[in-house]
Structures are given as structure tokens and as C-alpha cells.
Amino acid sequence: MPRKATGTIVWANDHWRARIRLADGTRPWVDLPRGLSEAQARKKAQELTTRARTLGATRDNKGGDLAAATESVREWSVRWIVERERRGIRSVRNDQSRLDTHILPVFGNQPIRAVVRADVEGFVERLDRKVQGETLSWKTALNIWTLLCAMFRDASASKSRALRVRDDNPCANVSPPDRGGKKSKVYLFPSEFLRLMECEGVSVQWRRLVAVAIYLYARAGELQALHWEDLDLDHGVVQIHRAFDRDRDVEKETKGEEARRFNIEPALLPLLREMRAQVKGSKVFPEFPQENELAEELRRYLKIAGVSRGELYASDRTRKNMTFHDLRATGITWMAVRGDAPIKIQRCAGHKSFATTDGYIREAVVVSDGFGSPFPPLPRSLYADGRGAGGAEEEAAPANGPRNGPPEMANGPEPQRFRAVTLVRGGGLEPPRCYSLAPQASASANSAILAAGRGVCPVSPSPVNKFFHDAARPSRGRCL
């Protein structure tokens, strides 16, 4: 009967070292993780000794660090995540979540060196079954697979020698999970954008945020980290070189770690100058909505503005609903519809691969007829004094495309008017429906529409975030 594993430990400046017995009777020293108490270190030494005997580890076959011969996937993953944090990898929070939810329940208790290709192939089959059973999306399955491959790649060939515990990568040459169908792109047509911009049931701050997001083709984090020093309003140039990391609450480099500089859309420049005169501080948006509120609030305000196209709110195997990130996609699509040079689109959007840009160009080719005029002048209501870029006599908006709005008119469409906003159970707001006056109808017909009732109805501010509504100047609309 082998001698009971008790574990011998010594203190080495800032951590414990354990002397463990291998299957061949040798007793090498192993460095234990920092932060262990003496009792925890003794228990860890016993565990390592027991596992080494079970695996039959010897000095000749242990490969690199002896701790690796007995270390479990769960234990090794803790060191791996710490190293990824040290390297500044931004996906660490999502990596840890995928590890805890999908990978460690399967591999966690296995020794990191004992995982073989058959184990990995079984894991891929498990992911495919979840996708087929619709308990997991195929994109999530691919993200999990990518993380597993990165983990075992670092276990065999990491730059950090302390993480190299294997001589091979069990994920090599294993087929990944099956890919599913690609969901269609979603974006706003110019007429839908103008409907939102003209809707006084939506706060000026939110409408400005949407306009800047589309006209600068920027991500939410890039808008949150946008400073006035990044905007050269005299020469009409913007430099986007940083983004806000909501996980660590700090500013960081942009996705792809490459800055991009390009001309600001002419229609946006007057609004930016107006905002610069009003906004105090260095940031363009000193107050910013919470990340988990952006998509839901955008869809809510689109409904309030009467943008009812079902595609914007559908979520199924082939379609995705509108999110805040799709405002960036809207701006890029508009550039492609306008006929901008492909290299210009790629540079302004910050795409590393032209294949990504090509997807927007292909979409533009098939929807350009009746699309409307991209990047229209912004309506007067976005300015503090009600004056647009052209002064007091400027009309509200240019013509909309025939596909998504009334035909072109010399003086632009009539302003939107709303039914009264009513409270519903739970304290929320029932989105009002917007009705445009018919431009082709006679004056008497339009008078009859307005005769249904007039009045001023304040739209209560959303309790979600004070950013969404002006506190000093509540939005008011004419109610029918």
C-alpha cells in the first residue's frame, strides 16, 4: 500500500512551494498559486501528489512544469484568464462566462494534459445537438469553439511559458460546429430616419445621438468616447481613435486598434456646431444611455415615431431586430447606396477586411431603386432655436424616396402630429401613432383631419435614464 500523501510545503517570498511525490518515487518542488493560506497550500500539495500518482507522472514524462502534469482544466483556466487580462484582451468577461457555462462543465475536472482529440470531437457533437435543438444559436456555438481552440492553443504554444503545459493541441484538425443561416442586415431608410428626427415625442438628446451615430458610422462605444478635440469643425474632419470599455469603465483603443480619419457628412456639420456651443465639457455626449438600454429604447422610440416596418422588430432564424449598432450599419449602407468609392467606405467604416464592406455594397445594389436620398439635411427641431442649417426660412426636411414615404414635394412634408399618449398598466407609455397629412389631398381634406381634435399633450420622460428626455424642456407635440 503506497504511503499516504501528506504534502510538504515551504514559503518562498510571496507564495508557497510544495514538494510532491511522483509515481517513480522522485520528489520535485512545485510552485503553488499566490494567495493561498498555509492550510490551503497543504491541501493543494496533497491533491497534486494524489493526482500525480493516478496519472503515473514521472520526471521523464511530465513535459515542462510538473504542476501541469496534474493541473485540471479548471485550475489552468484561472491562470489563463489572468494572463489574458494582463495582455489587455477585451473579451475576458465574455470568455469567462462561456468557460463557466459551456466548457468547464465538460472539461473542468479533467487534467489539462489528459484531454485528447476524441474528447474535443465529442464536445463539438454536443454543441451541434444544442444548435439543432434550438437551445443555442450557431454563432454562439462558434464563439465557444473559438474560445476552446484558443485555450488549448495557448496550453501548447503560449508566449507565456508558464501556460505551456502540453506538447500538442487536441483541437487541431477537428471540424468546427456547423454554421447556420446568416441573418439579413437591418437598417433605416432615409424616410424612416426623418420620421424619427421630426418626432417631438422623442427627446432632442436621443434624436441627436441617433443622427450622429448614422452620419459618423460610429459604434456606441466610439460615440461615448468621442471628444470635441476629435472633431475639426473648421475643416469638417473627424478622427475616431478611441472607444469606451464599459466592462472596465475606461477609454481604450478602437476595435481593430486602428484610428480612422474622414470627412464629416456636410448635413451633420451645422448640428455639431450647434451642439458645441451648448455642450459643456470635453465630451460630445457627456451623458450616455446604459448599454443594456440602447437597443430597447431605440425600438421604443421608433414605434413612437410611427416607424412600423415589421422587419425592424422581427427576431427569428433569418431576421434580427433593430439594435443601436445597426445605426452604424445604416450609415454604411447609405454610403453604398449613394455610390461612394468602395475604398472610401472601407476606410470610413474601419473594416479590416474588404469582404465586410462588400456585403454592404451588394445590399445597396439590390435596394437602391426607391431607396430615398441618403444623409438628408437635418430638421429644424434638432436645433435649440428651431433653426436648421439654412436659417429660419429653411423647411423641415428634403424629399423622401417614393418607396418609404410620400413623393417629393417642393417644400418638404408636413410635420408629424400625434395622438395623445396614454398611460397603460404598470406606469409605462403607450406609443402614439404618427399620422402624416396627405400631401396630395385638398386643403379641405387636411382641415378635416385636423378638425378631429387639437391640444397639447406633454410626453412624460422615461424613468429609465435621464438622458432620454430634456428635463428643462419637456417635449410637447400637437395631439389629434
Image (cartoon, grey):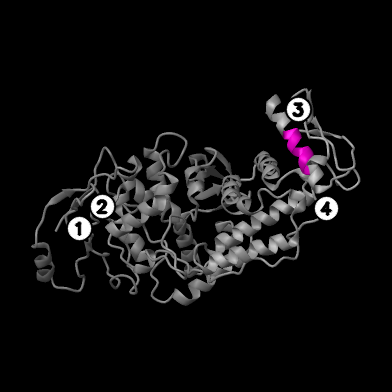
Q: CA distance from mark 4 to mark 2?
A: 64 Å
- Image quadrant where one finds the C terminus: bottom left
Observer-nearest of 405 and 310: 310
Mark 2 → mark 1, Cα distance in angstroms = 9 Å
Q: Tags 2 and 1 in contact by the CB under 8 Å rule?
A: yes
Answer whether labels 3 and 1 touch (C-beta < 8 Å).
no
Q: Residue at x 43, y 55 (%)?
A: 324
Magenta segment includes 402: no
Q: Which residue is mark 1?
A: 418
| Mark closest to the chain's N terminus, 2 or 3 | 3
List x then y, in percent, for residue 23: 86, 43
User: What segment carries the magenta color?
Assistant: 44-51
Residue that lies at the very extreme toward the front in this rendered image: 1
Residue 47 inside the magenta-drawn segment: yes
Q: Is residue 229 above or below residue 451?
A: above
With 253 as the anchor, is 18 left or right in this view? right
Number of the front mark, 4 or 2: 4
